[in-house]
Amino acid sequence: MAEEITLITGATGFVGSAVARVLLERGHKLRLFVRHTSDRSNVADLPVEFAVGDLSDQASMEAALEGVSYLFHVAADYRLWVPDPDAMMRANVEGTRQLMLAAKKAGVKRVVYCSSVAALATARNGVPATESSPVTEDQIVGAYKRSKYRAEQEVLRLVREEGLPAVIVNPSTPVGPRDIKPTPTGQMILDAATGRMPAYVETGLNIVHVDDVAEGHVLAFERGTIGEKYILGGENIMLGDLFGMVAEIVHRKPPRIQLKQSWLYPVACVSELLARSCGIEPRVTREMLVMSKKLMFFSSEKAERELGYRPRAARQALTDAIAWFKAHKSGQFSA
């Protein structure tokens, strides 16, 4: 009898590489679906096979799924600003739809789709949102968040109408080791840790260790219910308090200047203009300022109750992230 194969998309990235490690620990035989341009340094030491392709290439998806029993779809275009939102929609929504259809056709037994809390409602009156908090697309701000909402709705439709055997996970804001790009949140932590963030706009977010997110993916695979969503979060924290934690970890003073969103609106307009004309990714945009007014607080109670999910404290996630940045981006800490 042939050994069962588990396919992961996005496995060279931050979350995907952590998922790959947990699956290997559980004894899975892994095939990683990667683009020919992917940086494989996050998985270079792992005993896996590679299938080269792209979510826009149907033939490559079908080839990668040949002989596969289980699929973890973690890949996504994750940027808070894009010059062409339609391209992000194609990758995150249409790419997901085509992959799910190909998986169903290939006879994949179980799918774990990595959505995001970006597809969910935000906290209201300070009460953390859950998987069932009501939300509509017109309440969601930003191309990335809208793309994740649409992709999640498409997966749910395929579960209902096509019998797709998919479980959905909604990670919050992962931080930790192997954030090679880094992600927007990782860059923010790196800037704070190296004293390059003198001021900030207050908001609230949910911080979770990337390895807990990875464990949550595998728990959803092992124990989750088809068609259900599970928030994989950690600790709800205000941004100012997060920067205070970072400052304590690196023995620096935290940023003290708290800016109002309205003060940065002209800066955001100029940043977007420069980004479109020069191709430089902006540090602040109008959509970011709108998003900062919403508290991204979430409850992982359902995942804890049904999956046995147990996330660690935000401080540990930040400590591990900073240790990794110091080891791999040491030049930015010399000042």
Image (cartoon, grey):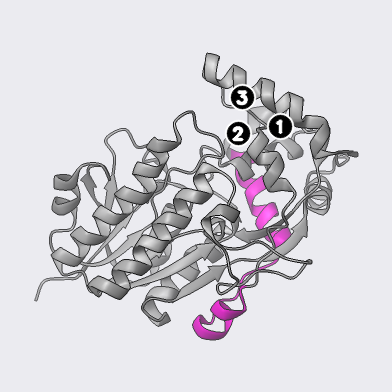
Q: Earlier in the sequence, mark 3 or mark 2?
A: 3
| Secondary structure state at the residue bearing disc 1 | helix
| Secondary structure state at the residue bearing disc 3 | helix
Is mark 1 in CB contact (under 8 Å) with mark 3?
Answer: no
Distance of label 3 from label 2 (alpha carbons)? 28 Å
Q: Residue at x 51, y 37 (%)?
A: 181
Main secondary structure type of the part rendered in magenta: helix
Residue that extends furthest to the top in the rendered view of this protein: 278
Position in image of residue 88 (x %, y %): 41, 40
Q: Earlier in the sequence, mark 1 or mark 3?
A: 3
Q: Residue at x 75, y 30 (%)?
A: 265
Q: Which residues are magenta?
A: 300-327
Left or right of 227 on screen, residue 299? right
Distance of label 1 from label 3 (alpha carbons)? 29 Å
| Secondary structure state at the residue bearing disc 2 | loop
Q: Residues within 10 Å of mark 2 (few under 14, many from 20)?
A: some
Is mark 3 in CB contact (under 8 Å) with mark 2?
Answer: no
Residue with the mark numbered 2: 329
**Amino acid beneath label 3:** Glu
Residue with the mark numbered 3: 272
Q: Quadrant of residue 25?
A: bottom left
